Amino acid sequence: MTRSEERIREQLLHSISEAACTVGEGRAASVALLDEPSGELVFVAASGETADDVQGARFPCTSGVAGEVLRTGRALFVGDLSHDPRFARDIAIASGYEPDALAVVPVRRDDEVIGVIEVLDPSRGESLLAPLEILAAHAAATLDVSAALFARG
């Protein structure tokens, strides 16, 4: 991937993380994509609190609520993370932000889950999942569009 392609992709995905944060009325939001060779989810875009700290961070794709969504392909809203055994508190602490609630939706390309969008401490409840799934479809389309822009070049 060229630097220009990478930059366009970053800007487009950042706008999606900002939209997710706004739609969810959350304190932070991120887009994390699966890096298959390493088996890690990589935060490729983030907005809100600690966005700069989380950008580029990696964690095992089997960890936390995000790992569950990646594995099952089902969106999840967890209103009280303190009692949820799937919550990867160690990852949250390392990122500098420990949320109380979380909404996570899968990002799909065709039938394959390739990443997740997360909103931390959303003011909206489970009703947030439907609009986040629309943004997740836009994230997948963004990846296709950025690749197509440079494939033609």
Image: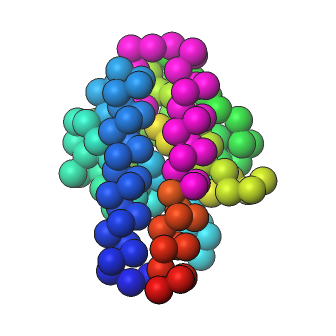
Q: Does the magenta stretch include residue 153?
A: no
Where is 6 relative to 96, above or below? below
**Of 64 and 129, which appears nearest the observer?**
129
**Of 30 and 99, which appears nearest the observer?**
30
Percent coordinates x, y for residue 139 in the rendering: 52, 50
Q: Is residue 121 magenta?
A: yes
Q: Name, please, the residue furthest toward the right.
A: 111
Secondary structure mainly formed by the magenta segment? helix
Where is 98 relative to 39, above or below? above
Residue visible at 42% across and 34% down?
20
- Using the rendered view, name the quadrant where residue 75 is placed: top right
Residue 71 lies left or right of residue 136; in this view the side is: right
Residue visible at 32% across and 58% down?
11
Residue visible at 40% across and 53% down?
13
Residue 127 lies left or right of residue 97; in this view the side is: right
Percent coordinates x, y for residue 87 in the rendering: 51, 34
Where is 54 relative to 96, above or below? below
Res. 63 visible in picture: no
**Of 39 and 4, which appears nearest the observer?**
4
> Which stretch is magenta?
119-141
Where is 93 relative to 146, above or below? above
Res. 7 visible in picture: yes
**Of 53 and 48, which appears nearest the observer?**
48
Residue visible at 25% across and 45% down?
51
Quadrant in the picture for the N terminus: bottom left
Percent coordinates x, y for residue 14 in the rendering: 34, 50
Percent coordinates x, y for residue 103 in the rendering: 51, 28
How many callouts does the rendering have?
0
